[in-house]
Amino acid sequence: MKRREFLHGTAAVSLGLTDALRASAAQDSGRKMLRYAFPIAETGFDPPQLIDLYSRIVTAHIFDGLYTYDHLARPFKIKPNTADGMPEVSSDFRVWTVHLRPGIHFVDDPAFDGKRRELVAEDYVYSFKRFFDPRWKAAAYATLSELKIRGLEALRSTSLKNKTPFAYDQPVEGLRALDRYALQFTLEVPQPRLLQVLAGGDLYGAVARDVVERYGDDIMGHPVGTGPFKLADWRRSSRIVLERNPTYREHLYDAEPNDDDAEGKAMLARFRGRRLPMVDRVEISIIDEAQPRWLSFLNKQQDLQERLPNEFINIAAPTGVLAPGLAKQGIQLYRVPASDVTVTLFNMEDPIVGGYEPEKVALRRAIGLGSNVAKEIRLARKGQAIQANSGLAPMTYGYRPEFRSENGQYDLARARALLDTFGYIDRDGDGWRETPKGEPLVLNWSTEPNQVSRQLDELRRTDMNALGLRVEFRPAKWPENMKNMRVGKLAIWSVGLSSAAPDGQPTFDSGASIHMGGQNLARFRNARFDEIYSRMQVIPDGPERLELFDQAVRIIVAYMPYKYSVHRILTDLAQPWLHGYRRPPFWNTWWQYVDIDAAEQAKAIQ
């Protein structure tokens, strides 16, 4: 079935997709299949090349990190994954030694010439080195470079300077395989929170060198890991299919829910000791329009409505309670605050909205003060969000719900006064302000061609009209916007950022100059911010570090390279035959922990 039919015709949704699902159900009779949809297209499945959430959800289930998060513990608990026990850590947090569990194997692949390929310490050495290889243009390079792993930066510099291939075979002091199953990190500075990096299997899972060298530049489509699933089919921006990894190690369901977590304790009692994964197949559709995504769930073509679109909140869960009609069908409701923030990015190198001159700062601050976020929450988000006062997300270290800043204020009069004071006035009487030099002023705002974005854009247009600022929205697919924003080609873009770790430090990646082109999409530079950022990374949690967080927040609010809008409240719906679902707050792995009643599912599809 063509993608165009799915997006533009309800009949195609009801007939074409249903026929395909029936055929799939007949073919996979007796197998357990999880079906749901992504609202945004993936970019690929090679960890160093990723920056988007949805690709990382897939890679989190294919690749194995050394450590992982307990599925039921909240807010989080880190435990061994491929590691054999917790790391040995020096008293100054500079030397971390990890032992691997023997007997873990990669999924079979032609790259291994018919041999079973065991996971060894050298695989992690190679996988971490790949982020320093200029060939892959890794967005997460900046994050790992800040760990100051001894010797890796020198390897990268040599490759760049001499324009030679990265020297993977050259040993470095900071990242070594001590033996077949022991791995050691030696760092130039203390890293008290390195364990959270090692738990990021979606990016820092083990990749086999044999596989990368076989597939080369096509590696995005050939993910080969040791995790619970393997990629079975991929139709770019349309469909992703994964199947159970037949060589996956014996991994039994176990978890440690909080003492007051009745739901978690019930899940543990039901699934303890079950071999993972419990489903055989995961089918993901890419459906960027909200209505077809919602209809496919109602028509029982999806097992999970992940992130219920806001326009259907009052239908599905008015006042936060499941609607009676859905409750009668056995639909399950999950409603949690997201550890995320939505943000408008201003390219600091753009000739209109960028720059550090007082008038440029005034323009961005006026746009921020003139953005009616309360109206956005009420109308576009249907109450499913709270006002953001900084980029620190709920549930992360450093977030304080009582904190207030100018970022969270709506003050139209003050916004207009700022523009007037710094020379953004209407000189020709056409109703639109010009630049202080009298040149035309147009805000080029990049956006996506979907219903949610269109609703938000109309509110933004109203806000900017009230300021006398002309705005032109430029729609493009999300991956295209991300690619262009990373290289500084967009002026303004609004996007959601999700926390991938419990620490609040990654929030400030967006302001650190070392992350320019990666997490620092606004291309912001500030020497004082960089000093604060470097200091907060190496000291333990405590009052001094929290004070540094506050200083960093104040700098971002003052220069306004980012206008933070809301922290979202997420509502997920599950069909009655999906069991064990719980949304992770920071990590991306959950498919292996859910079960499907295949008989009930098949009956509903027929």
Image: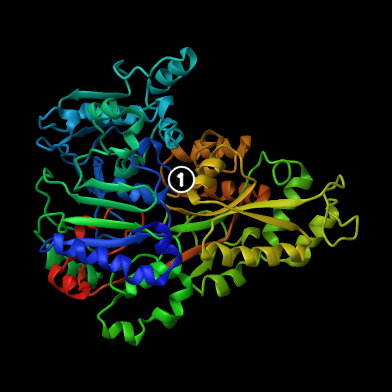
Q: Is residue 339 shown above or below 359?
A: below
- Left of 247 or right of it: where is 552? right
Relative depth, front residue between 311 and 580: 311
Residue 317 in view, yes or no: no
Q: Is residue 419 shown above or below 326?
A: above
- Left of 459 or right of it: where is 36? left
Percent position (x, y) of residue 263?
23, 71
Task: Say few, some or many: other residues with alpha carbon within 10 Å of mark 1 (under 14 / 14 to 19 / 20 or more).
Answer: many
Residue plotted at (74% across, 64% down):
465
Q: Please identify the residue farthest to the right as the structure is shown.
A: 428
- Which quarter shows the C terminus? bottom left
- Which quarter shows the N terminus? bottom left
Q: Quadrant of residue 428?
A: bottom right
Q: Please identify the residue farthest to the top as the structure is shown.
A: 162
The colour style of the image is rainbow
Residue plotted at (73% across, 48% down):
361
Relative depth, front residue between 34 and 547: 34
Percent position (x, y) of residue 43?
40, 44
Percent position (x, y) of residue 432?
82, 59
Q: Is residue 433 shown above or below 67?
A: below
Residue plotted at (26% across, 23% down):
176
> Could you tell me which secondary element the residue under label 1 belongs to?
helix
- Left of 420 or right of it: where is 145? left
Relative depth, front residue between 202 and 386: 202
Residue plotted at (10% across, 63% down):
30
Residue 311 in view, yes or no: yes
Percent position (x, y) of residue 546?
50, 49
Q: What residue is shown with label 1?
A: 506
For badge 1, the amino acid type reads Pro
